[in-house]
Image (cartoon, helix red, strand yellow):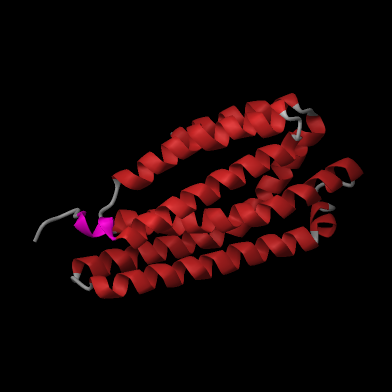
């Protein structure tokens, strides 16, 4: 719910910037979805495996599984984002021939590479932390990250400083990367080991 509300708020900022920017945002969002859909599938599979290993008291194997899944997710998401950035004019020509939109989308897709880096970490780590029994941390980090980082920085970069859609994408990338670092620290700290969904 918080994510959808924050995205709606950011979309209101995008609407201020004009029709070409709105269209660019829609097109790039479709491409972004292709970048992280595989990460979602990988995260779901990892969540099942982590839950199984935790239930079997095989904690020693959990961390390796999480790091491997995270690195694979990063490779896939960043690889696809880089591919779409390199071929942006060809890919986006399916949607439009407008040179303004093609130019803006090309710049956005450069930022998207860094955004996907953070998003891949987030998607995998949230699923694995939840499977390990650490439910509260992903929820709190997600909510506070969206409303203390993504939304205010979108306004600051995109509207106040006049960076437009590029600024909004930079803000969302910063939010994803920051939350990703917090989740990695949370897992590395080992505090999730004190959490349990069920007791033997």
Residue found 66% across the figure and 64% down from its top: 80
Q: Quadrant of the C terminus?
A: bottom left
User: Image point 60% across, 42% down: which residue?
Assistant: 172
The stretch in magenta equals: 190-195
Placement of 49 over or under 178, stated as above or below: below
Percent position of residue 144, x then y: 43, 36
Question: Taking 134 as reference, is 145 above or below it?
Answer: above
Q: Is 107 one of the magenta-colored residues?
A: no
Q: Nearer the viewer, residue 125 or 39?
A: 125
**Image check: 83 left or right of 6?**
right
Residue that appears at 52% across and 61% down: 39
To which quarter of the image does residue 140 belong?
Answer: top left
Residue 47: x and y in percent read: 35, 62
Residue 129 percent location from the top left of the image: 33, 56
Taking the image as shown, residue 195 lies to the left or right of residue 28, namely left
Give x and y (percent) for residue 133.
25, 54
User: In the visual, does 51 lie left or right of 33?
Assistant: left
- Residue drawn at (40%, 65%) of the image: 45
Q: Is residue 111 something that shows in the picture?
A: yes
Q: Kindly give the residue lying farthest to the left in the view shown.
A: 200
In front: 11, or 142? 142
Q: Report which quarter residue 88 is drawn in.
A: bottom right
Q: Main secondary structure of the magenta part?
A: helix
Q: How many marks?
A: 0
């Amino acid at each position: 719910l918080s994510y959808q509300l924050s995205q709606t708020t950011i979309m209101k900022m995008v609407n201020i910037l004009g029709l070409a920017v709105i269209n660019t945002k829609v097109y790039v969002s479709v491409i972004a979805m292709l970048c992280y859909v595989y990460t979602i599938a990988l995260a779901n599979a990892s969540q099942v495996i982590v839950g199984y290993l935790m239930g079997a008291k095989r904690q020693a194997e959990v961390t390796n599984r999480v790091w491997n899944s995270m690195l694979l997710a990063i490779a896939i998401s960043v690889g696809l984002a880089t591919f779409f950035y390199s071929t942006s004019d060809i890919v986006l020509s399916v949607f439009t021939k407008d040179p303004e939109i093609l130019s803006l989308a090309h710049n956005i897709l450069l930022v998207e590479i860094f955004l996907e880096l953070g998003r891949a970490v987030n998607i995998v780590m949230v699923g694995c932390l939840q499977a390990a029994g650490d439910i509260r941390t992903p929820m709190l980090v997600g909510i506070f990250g969206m409303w203390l980082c993504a939304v205010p920085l979108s306004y600051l970069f995109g509207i106040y400083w006049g960076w437009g859609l590029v600024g909004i994408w930079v803000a969302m990338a910063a939010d994803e990367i920051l939350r990703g670092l917090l989740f990695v620290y949370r897992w590395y700290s080992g505090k999730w080991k004190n959490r349990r969904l069920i007791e033997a």
